[in-house]
Image (cartoon, rainbow, N blue to C red):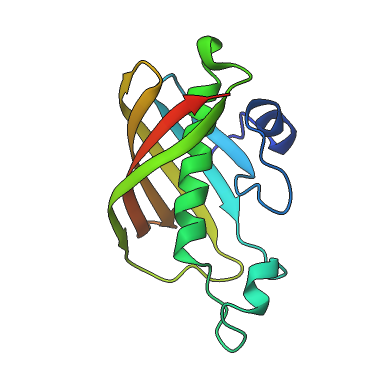
Amino acid sequence: MSRIILERSDIERIIPHREPFLLVDAVTELTDDRVVALKHVKPDEDYFRGHFPALPVMPGVLIIEAMAQAGAVCVLNREEFHGRLAFFGGMDKVRFKRKVLPGDTLRLVVQLNQLRGSVGFASGKAYVGDDLAASADLIFAIGG
């Protein structure tokens, strides 16, 4: 298992998300242009009550949101963006490859590819173990 370098309280100092919408539990790697983060998918997550009661599956949009939050940790950790917000500008090439189930741990890998002023482009992947669960190209804007 990778060493935790940022815990939840550290993450909360970087991004504004809070329960029940904070989808990053820990960070194991962080540079100016790459982050590896973890999301522990707990069986009591509220969305499982309705998605789907007979077969609980983490919604794909929340997997992408978890990737975006991990990317926000990477970008907003930069000195020039401390205290700012990162907003979705778009997403492309979104693909879902496997179900994410209660008890799984998502490993979120986000690579910042380009930053032009306050607009950035990143590639994200979410894994369960070694299996790719989802991938997407993310576009964001720094505001606030």
**How far across and down, in percent of the image, does residue 20 sit?**
72, 54
Q: Residue at x 63, y 32 (%)?
A: 15
Residue 13 in the image: above or below residue 53? above
Q: Quadrant of the N terminus?
A: top right
In this view, the residue in front, 50 or 99, is 50
Q: Is residue 113 left or right of residue 98?
A: left
Q: Residue at x 50, y 67 (%)?
A: 59
Q: Residue furthest top?
A: 80
Q: Residue furthest front?
A: 144
Residue 98 in the image: above or below residue 35? below
Among the 4 quarters of the image, the one containing residue 128: bottom left
**How far across and down, in percent of the image, does residue 82 sit?**
60, 16
Q: Residue at x 58, y 51 (%)?
A: 39
Among the 4 quarters of the image, the one containing residue 121: top left
Q: Is residue 91 visible?
A: yes
Q: Is residue 1 visible?
A: no
